[in-house]
Image: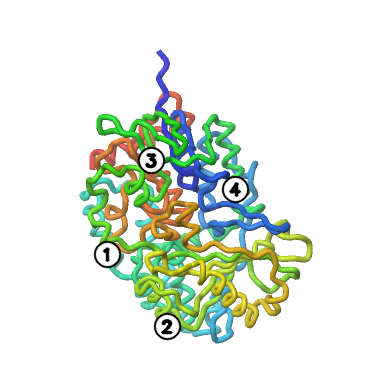
Amino acid sequence: MNEKLAHSVIIGSGFGGIGAAIRLRARGHKVTLIERLDQLGGRAQVFEKNGFRHDAGPTVITAPFMFEELFDLLGERMADHVNMVPVAPWYRFHFADGRAFDYGEDMDALRNEIGRFNSADISGYEKLLAASKAIFDVGFTQLADRPFLRFTDMIRQIPALMRLRSDRTVSQFVNRHITDPNIRKAFSIQPLLVGGNPFSTTSIYSLIHYLEREWGVHFCMGGTGALVRALEKLMQRHDIDIITGADVEKILMKDGRACGVRLADGTEISADNVVCNADPPTVYREMLPDDKRAKRPLPEALTQYSMGLYVLYFGTTKQYPDIAHHTIWMGKRFKGLLGDIFNRKKLAEDFSLYLHRPTATDPSFAPEGCDSFYVLCPVPNLQSGTDWSVEAPKLRDRIVSALDATILPDLKNTITADFWMDPTDFQRDYRATHGAGFSIAPIFRQSAWFRYKNRDPHIENLYFVGAGTHPGAGLPGVLSSAKALDRLFPVSAASSIPPQTRLNQAADITKDAAE
């Protein structure tokens, strides 16, 4: 007798949702992927204006093997469909004192760069990297794709976490090894890439240093949007049903289990499992409004959310060849500015910026002789009460003026086709609670078991992937959250997963259950 395929419905098509769809399809499920926007990718949208193309969301790829795994699971090779290229330098920092610092793969060049600021920090960086590897070996290799469903899962890891001093912040971790103020800033910015304040984010996230060193920083030719399109075609070739332009209004329940979803137009889709790649607070507040049981140990009143994002997209009518692919433009303030953003919820007059110039690697992003840019400015989320209809155009002008006066001379005259997104857009387009760019903040008391679970604690067939659940935001994080499903779902007879991989995954599930 043929085995009936389990039907899994996935809400949201960010990389967590795409990863979940492919992994469940490989495990033999019938899969339906639902996206409320007109194109897949979640925050990884693509905008085009007047011949300029912009990746709207993630632009830094640090673990390309995790995308390779998705193609491998369905018997294909990523290299046949996308072209990943290394970026050099990984980042170029421009500090408020006018100095620049290139951070990249070449260790000799990096030592020379650090030595220009403080020669004593060369050995300090090597110690930092060794400490980062120790955290990586536990935090990423062992725990990133392990669902923390029970408190005992957390208890078992406490000795390792205490040994690695996970109670320290990223800033404290970096400052133990580095003394130069500018280099301290450069090596402390990683939490901002996942929505955290370096002065409060757990030092577990310092593993990003070693993750970058292990696999480098890459760019997908054609942009992150090209990667999304390649994954979309992969899913279509393997019979994953994709629905776009459809907003999920409610998760349907029957006898204490999720039994499907209702769309805003009234359409109902039945399911054996529901996987949410939507923001967990939004899911519980709007899609499961009648379920009052606790989903996390901490109440909503004590929950801290990540910062908001103001993203300015623009083209230039000339090229800026001295600007790297990834640039960090640092303002005069660091700790005080982050305090305004995260703690005081105040939109300050000053800022620090991340600039993405894809035309440094891929000229197709702009007309000939032009450049394409996106500038990301961390700002407070909507809990600040900021009136973005008033403040957004003012911030645009301040950013343009600052860049014009420093690294993009004459920008005021060369900028063209500009537009922006602010936290109100994140709330409207992505249903992000408080317009937060990365869901809840990555602080220690909101990590692992304390974060939203990969499986609901009360509804056994309701699952979560993406930035708000374990292990957290960033491409490696959301892809790891999808990989955690491998430990929660058995492999069916219709699976396309190779036999040895099935055995290894079955052993993982058995081990998790025994523990």
User: Alpha-carbon neighbours of circle 4 within 10 Å: few (<14), some, or many (≥20)?
Assistant: many
Residue at 63 percent across and 81 percent down: it is 406
Count of labels shown? 4
For disc 1, the neighbor class at 10 Å (few under 14, some 14 to 19, many from 20) is few
Q: Quadrant of the C terminus?
A: top left
Q: Which mark is residue 285?
A: none
3D distance between C-alphas at marks 2 and 1: 23 Å
| Nearer-N-terminus badge (1/3) | 1
Identify the residue position indicated by label 4 in the image.
227
- Check disc 3 and give the amino acid type: Leu
Q: Position of residue 239 (x, y in %)?
A: 54, 29
Residue 107 shows in the view:
no
The reply to whether callout 2 and callout 4 are in contact (CB within 8 Å) is no
Q: Where is residue 233 shown, x and y percent of the image?
A: 60, 38
Kindly identify which residue carries mark 3.
485
Q: Seen in the image, is 332 located left or right of residue 367?
A: left
Q: Amino acid at mark 4?
A: Leu
Identify the residue position indicated by label 2 in the image.
Answer: 179
Instruction: Give residue 261's position: percent from left, percent from top.
Output: 40, 35
Mark 1: amino acid: Arg
Q: Identify which residue, 6 or 142, lies in the foreground.
A: 6
One can see residue 63 in this view: yes
Q: Between label 2 and label 1, give the one nearer the viewer.
A: 2
**481 left or right of 158 in image:** right
Q: Is residue 84 above or below residue 24?
A: below
Q: How far across and down, in percent of the image, does residue 482 sit?
A: 42, 44
Q: CA distance from mark 2 to mark 4?
A: 39 Å
Residue topped by disc 1: 163
